[in-house]
Amino acid sequence: MHPARVPSHDEVLQTFRRAGFASLTPLQRGLIPLLLKDRDAVAEVPEGAGASTAIAAPLALALRGAGPALRALIILPNAEEVGKVARAFTRFARTVRDAPAFVPLGEIEDARREQRRLEREATVIAGTAGRVIDHIRRGSLSFGSLQTVIVREPAPEDRAEFVKDVQFIVAKWTERPRIILLARPPLAEDNELVPLLHHPLTMEVQEKDGSEAALGTHVAILPDGRPSAESLARVILGMRLPPVLAFYSPRTDGREMIDLLRSRGLRAALLPPGGRQQPDRREALQALSRRALDVLLVPLATGGVAPDVEDLAPSQIVFLDIPTGPLRSPGGMLKRAAIIALGEREKDLGRLQEAIGVAFERKELPDDNALLTGAIDRVLRRIRDEDKAELARLRTRIRRQVPFLLRPLFMASLLKSQLALPSAAAGQPPRTPSGVRQRGSSAVLPQGPASEVPTLPRGQRGRFGRSSPEAGRPLRRPEAQKRQEAPRPAEGPRTPRAEPRAGGDYAQLFVSVGRNRRVYARDLTELFTEKLQLAAGDIGGVRVFDKYSFVDISRSRAEEAISRLTGLEVKGRPITVNYAKKKEEKEAK
């Protein structure tokens, strides 16, 4: 951006107010100055934290009257993100005089319509990586005047292809623009996109300011018949609260609550009795203040809040039990913090309201979706604090023991068992992938002596045509055991990728995409596995040609694959999936 066009802080605030926003969020206050500086930068931005607005406002202001040439390119992971940025940019452009022309790519299916808009005027472009590459090949994009590139990282499961696409786009630049990477927290040390930047500025993760506690309101939540500890775990994870102080009645078994909270992955502790000089008590209070704890349980005292607890000045306080008498807070802690009360009876809430002098707003307990989102975010934030050597050792163990296609299900099973979530379909047992048997609430691999499981001879080729790293090790899946025991044809062993199995339990499907769209066997395997939730033995083989491909899939899943994958966009183009025609029919035509 040209220094003469960089807006001031007051201009940004005025633009937000004209667009209908009362003030800047913490994320916007940190990210907008980073976007306005003429430096490469990396910002850790959580999902759903309002990054689209933070991107659109400074670009609309800084590129006023910049002309028709492309000055800013925003590369986004999917069409939904493109739509968010487009709506935010339109909202700010209405309040900015001589705002730059904006063109979204990938929000609609019609690439030719986008091409006509690009030919007229496009100062700011936001698009999916695949659609940007499509227009590069069409000759619709010129990067000669490009000044700023903003890259928003996708979800981890879509990351591999996204990184390749961004690297392909970077290779097409004649002159290097500045790059701003919006990374998902935590930022990995081996992030493949960071080397594309030159001495970047960094902005650490900003807490999502969407919870009731962050807004400073006092909330009363219905426990819905759940135990107090279970409700507290849902509140902390589902509302993404920072470390909280939780008051409970001395009649409640605090140790049992601690055990349940820890089983949900929360770092919890009881505040020991005593005064300031008690070492264990002082250590527990310090642990909460330095964020080494997620929750500190404090028994309700008849004389009010203890002085050393007042000194903590927490931003969030949870009442698991309603106090029966006046609750004095000499230091004013209860007046300054956002309070969450878990209670069902209006009489109890009224008593608490009188005791501390605040009004409560009724809310529901966070649902399973909010619980999952908060739990995953919390795990990601903790990775940076974990012992890297220990994590590497466990990762190696998972790679050796858990088959590649079962690893996402393996992690999902661990998360479900930790959060004790109910099955998706009430009254029906959750679907267990092939080769995995159910034990309690967690899926586990079958156990047994290694001598009872057949092994592959060393040097035999793996499932996808490459030498398998598991050669010589026991096969852990029943499907693999059946294939090993099945008699082989006289012409010798077959490589699944070279000659896919069409017949028997497999059907051969035609896919209208191939190598000329930079699609390979690994991409199709991941596509079928992710969209259809296939088990390890449901894909027999994959063959990829220039303009089309063949995939052998379990016959029972073929119709589902055709209906769900036809029309899906792959590398910027909708695909067609159908049964492959027989060779005799092709020759007849």
Image (cartoon, grey):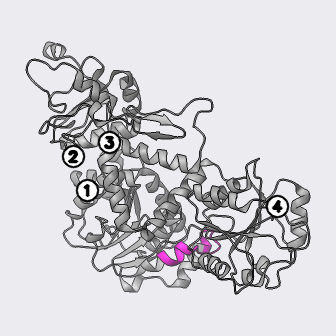
In primary-sequence order, the first of circles 3 and 1 is: 1
N-term mark: 4 or 2: 4
Is label 1 in a helix, a strand or a loop? Answer: helix
Callout 1 environment at 10 Å: few (<14), some (14 to 19), or many (20+)? Answer: some
Q: Does residue 538 appear to the left or right of 419 in the view shown?
A: left
Give the vertical position of 307 relative to 177 (above or below). Answer: below
Left or right for 574, reference 588:
right
Mark 1 to mark 2 CA distance (whole Å):
10 Å
Return the residue at label 2: 518
| Res 403 label | 3
Asked whether the beta carbons under mark 1 and mark 2 sit within 8 Å of each other, the answer is yes
How many residues crowd mark 2 within 10 Å: few (<14), some (14–19), many (20+)? Answer: few
Q: Could you tell whether 392 is left or right of 302 in the image?
A: left
User: How far across and down, in percent of the image, does residue 122 sit?
Assistant: 35, 63
Q: Residues within 10 Å of mark 4 (few under 14, many from 20)?
A: few
Rendered-image quadrant of the C terminus: top left
Identify the residue at horizontal 63%, vertical 58% (top origin): 259
- Mark 4 falls on what kind of element? loop
Q: CA distance from mark 3 to mark 1?
A: 25 Å
Residue 85 is at least partly visible in this image: yes
Mark toward the viewer: 1 or 4: 4
Q: Which residue is rendered at x = 61% and y = 48% of the image? A: 368
First reached walking from the N terminus: tag 1 or tag 2 = 1
Image coordinates for residue 242, horizontal then vertical, percent: 61, 70
Label 4, label 3: how many angstroms apart (C-alpha)? 48 Å
Say if 288 sits above or below 519 in the image.
below
Residue hosting label 1: 164
